[in-house]
Amino acid sequence: MKVTLPENYKDIYTLTELTMAKAVISCMKEDSYPIKEYADMAAREALKNRNRSDYVRTVLTATAQTYKNNRIEWNGMCGGSGYFDVWIDFIAETGSGFIKGGAYLSDIFGIGAVDIYPHMYIHYYTEH
């Protein structure tokens, strides 16, 4: 999976944090699961909590970047990653419109075990 640093990483990361963020990037290179599949899981979870009859048609775009997530265990993503996690941003077409959203990969991994909906960034766009 291709994970990148945020565009403004020089403004928000210290050198120590940059090392941790790069550890996440290095670790995620070994993950062969496509970003769009993780985005699809997050979009389905968002719809499940809003409108049970709606569905995800397709994920149009999905990106992955490193960000801090103080809700995960220290080095929870991989060795040397500290509190860094992968944030998945996505735009998905649904049966009734579009969803623009984002979720942490550690939360997506926990779908079913934890309710990730309160921790997601979600905007719904529908036709009326």
Image (tube, rainbow, N blue to C red):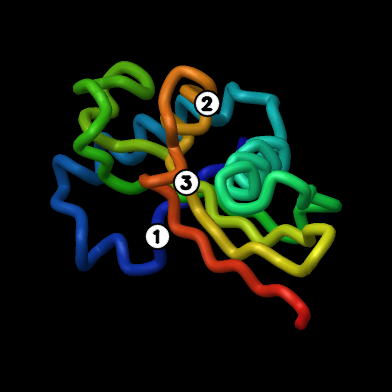
Q: Earlier in the sequence, mark 3 or mark 1?
A: 1
Circle 2 residue: 111
Q: Give amino acid for label 1.
A: Pro
Q: Is residue 40 left or right of residue 119?
A: right
Residue marked by disc 1: 6
Q: 10 Å neighbourhood of mark 1: few (<14), some, or many (≥20)?
A: some
Marks 2 and 3, Cα distance to the nearest angstrom?
11 Å
Q: Is residue 68 above or below residue 105?
A: below
Q: Residues within 10 Å of mark 3 (few under 14, many from 20)?
A: many
Residues marked 3 and 1 touching at CB (< 8 Å): no
| Amino acid residing under circle 2 | Ile
Disc number lying in front (2 or 1): 2
Q: CA distance from mark 2 to mark 1?
A: 25 Å
**Residue 19 spot, x, y in % from top left:** 25, 38
**Which residue is pictured at 63% across the width and 42% down the height?**
48
User: How many numbered marks have been drawn onto this rendered protein structure?
Assistant: 3
The N terminus: image quadrant: top right
Measured in 3D between alpha carbons, the distance from the residue under mark 3 to the one under mark 1, in whole angstroms, is 15 Å
Instruction: Residue at 76% x, 69% y: name it.
Output: 97
The label shown at residue 103 is 3
Q: Nearer the viewer, residue 14 or 110?
A: 110
Residue 98 found in image quarter: bottom right
Where is residue 111? Give x, y as percent. 52, 26
| Nearer the observer, 91 or 14 | 91
